[in-house]
Amino acid sequence: MSKTYNMAIVGATGLVGGTMLSVLEEDRELPIGQLRLMATANSAGKRLPFRDQEIAVEDVAQASFKGVDIALFAGGETASADYVRRAVAEGAVAIDNSSLFRMDPQVPLVVPEVNGQALERHRGIIANPNCSTIQLMPVLAALHREWGVESVSIASYQSVSGAGKEAVQELRQSTADFLAGQPRRQSKVFPHSIAFNLFPQIGSFDSEGHSTEEWKMVCETRKIMDLPQLPVLATCVRVPVFFAHSEAVQMSFSKACDPQRAREILAQTPCVKVLDDTAKGLYPTPIDGEGQDLVLVGRIRRDMTAKHGLAMWIVADNLRKGAATNAVNIARALIARQG
């Protein structure tokens, strides 16, 4: 009988944790022995369906990780700070979706299709990158191998689901209120009202005006690509879209590059799909990205501001490819290395 692996999801009742559960459900070949679901005391006792059974949610504060091989953390920084090291001490490998460990030099930050070799040096904790970083990486890495990237500029247009369940509900309610002629209410989640609006702020700003989300993209891109001096500029915008993030990206290279060659390279890149025929109005939108695991790329064209540059449009589901699926792919890669 082939080996099975006991797994746990911490934050199983949240948007990302629930999506992790769905991704695991879809992969019947993943050799899961026992799956345990954990969340705060408020969710303890709730039963969630998985593979023809129902699993009771445990209070993570009271739960033990003994016997768990791989623990997927999706409960935010507080839960990660409280329980990741405990899980590792009790024998689990922790795959953490928060930003807590991402820039720790002792913790690999992994997109398996790009830098899966980094898993070899993990010490029990593996960091899952930020959603907006994850969808950029397969595209950037593939083109870097061909031409050598010299700089990257990104403008991200990020859906409200990146801010959690309350943000999704707020967009629904504020949109309904606006269409009913009701006055705008002060947002409980965002710095501004989100319905029929957008704003260039995700996180707080530093003294130079860069937001925390923008710094995540800068630092994580450099770490995953192993290019610590790579010039990266990011502008992160929250938009009134429920699911899937979009990015307008400019890349400059050390060698002459070509849009058609880029399309050919990306068409052969795992987890990437090219949707690029402007004559037919073909390019990816958030609706195309929602509910699937591919990184969609279109509008590939020359960047006329750079000697050797390309511009493009990149879309992916932030809950799946940008979070849950990448975490599960890390788990798959760990299992493959042990198998």
Image (spheres, grey):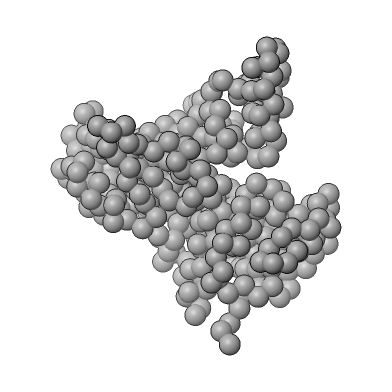
* Residue 69 position (above or below residue 182): below
Going 48% across and 74% down the picture, which residue do you hit? 336
Q: Nearer the viewer, residue 120 or 207?
A: 120
Residue 192 in the image: x percent, y percent?
A: 62, 21
**Left or right of 302 on screen, residue 168:** right
- Asked whether residue 234 appears in the rendered view, the answer is no
Please report the residue visible at 28 percent of the width from the left and 33 percent of the height from the top: 280
- Image quadrant containing the N terminus: bottom right
Q: Nearer the viewer, residue 306 or 249?
A: 249
Q: Quadrant of residue 168?
A: top right
Q: Horizontally, is 87 left or right of 299 in the view? A: right
Please provide percent x and percent y for residue 162.
Answer: 58, 39
Q: Nearer the viewer, residue 104 or 64?
A: 64
Q: Residue at x 32, y 39 (%)?
A: 298
Residue that sits furthest to the left in the current view: 256
Q: Quadrant of residue 206?
A: top right
Q: How many marks?
A: 0
Q: Is residue 292 visible?
A: yes
Residue 58, percent from left and from top: 80, 61
